[in-house]
Amino acid sequence: MINRYVWLVDTISRYGRITLKDLNQAWLRSDISEGKPLARRTFFHYRDGVEDMFDINIQCDKSTFEYYIDDSGGESNARLRSWLVDSVSMSGMLSNAHDISQRIMLENVPSAREHLPVIIDALKQNRRIRFSYKSYTRTLPTQGIVLEPYFVKIFKQLWYVIGLNVKDGLIKTYSLDRMSRLNLLQETFTMPEGIKPSEFFRDCFGIITNQNSPKRIVLRVEPTQAKYFRALPLHSSQQEEVHDNYSIFSYKMRITYDLKEEIMSHGASVEVLEPKELKTLIRTELEAALKNYQ
């Protein structure tokens, strides 16, 4: 049933607008139909299921009798819908591949299944959460952290929750895979008017942010690596100047730990040209690393 919901959303999204007649023809061409037409009553049943499961509204233009995906939720809602459909579609595809399971290589990713549903409930109801947290920089876990969760973000296949630490009075970020003893509290809170998830990490790469002003960051990238940068930009502000033997990528971002680590991960194929402080930071890190091999 979920695969049918995903097919319906994916098909209407690809067409943009489609009549029930054309949708039925596309349905019959797909393997999921098993040769049976998509009855009108069945379509309405699936449409209701899509709304309940994915919060995606399939609307009908009564002047043309065409069905379309309601995008009134904005860009962030569209990104979430795309991510949900892709994730469920991939899950369904893999679940039908038991006979070749040994030929499918997957990454070992810490699961957020245990904690993410609780945090989603907290976001919906604006309720505080309490948990223990095992930071990588501390020997013992911190007990009884009370957080007002503002939003969640996924980065490098790990889920994070960002919110107000009630005791410290500071907005902090916590990784779900390091949490334990997570509980949803009865205490509620009001989201601050100035906190907008789309703006919080706007000038940052990754999950770590700071109060520093965004800088103009310029990278010299070798041709092969430049292809990867084009396929998966580091940041929405990315711009490129193509030269014969290299590319110049420029950004407007804050200098953060995640950005430094990302640049260093590309080794000699990426060189920082600007700003001087980022160039000095990375050079210092590289010099310290070289001492380990002397």
Image (cartoon, rainbow, N blue to C red):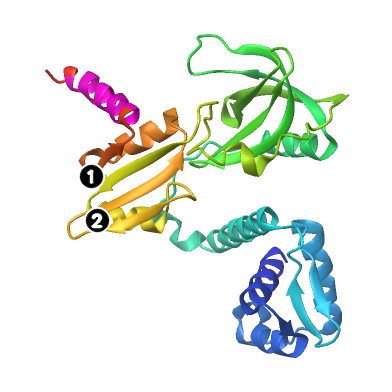
- Looking at this view, is 235 or 264 the one in front? 235
Seen in the picture, residue 6 relative to 249 is either above or below; the reply is: below
Residue type pointed to by label 1:
Ser
| Residue 106 appearing in the image | yes
Q: Which residue is mark 1?
A: 269
Residue at x 61% of width, y 40% of height:
153
Seen in the picture, residue 11 relative to 191 is either above or below; the reply is: below
Judge the density around disc 1: few (<14), some (14-19), many (≥20) Cα neighbours within 10 Å: some
Residue 269, percent from left and from top: 23, 45
Residue range of the region highlighted in magenta in the rendering? 277-290
Judge the density around disc 2: few (<14), some (14-19), many (≥20) Cα neighbours within 10 Å: few
Residue at x 60% of width, y 26% of height:
174
Q: Which residue is mark 2?
A: 224
Residue 84, percent from left and from top: 65, 56
Q: Are marks 2 and 1 in contact (CB under 8 Å)?
A: yes
Residue at x 28% of width, y 38% of height:
272
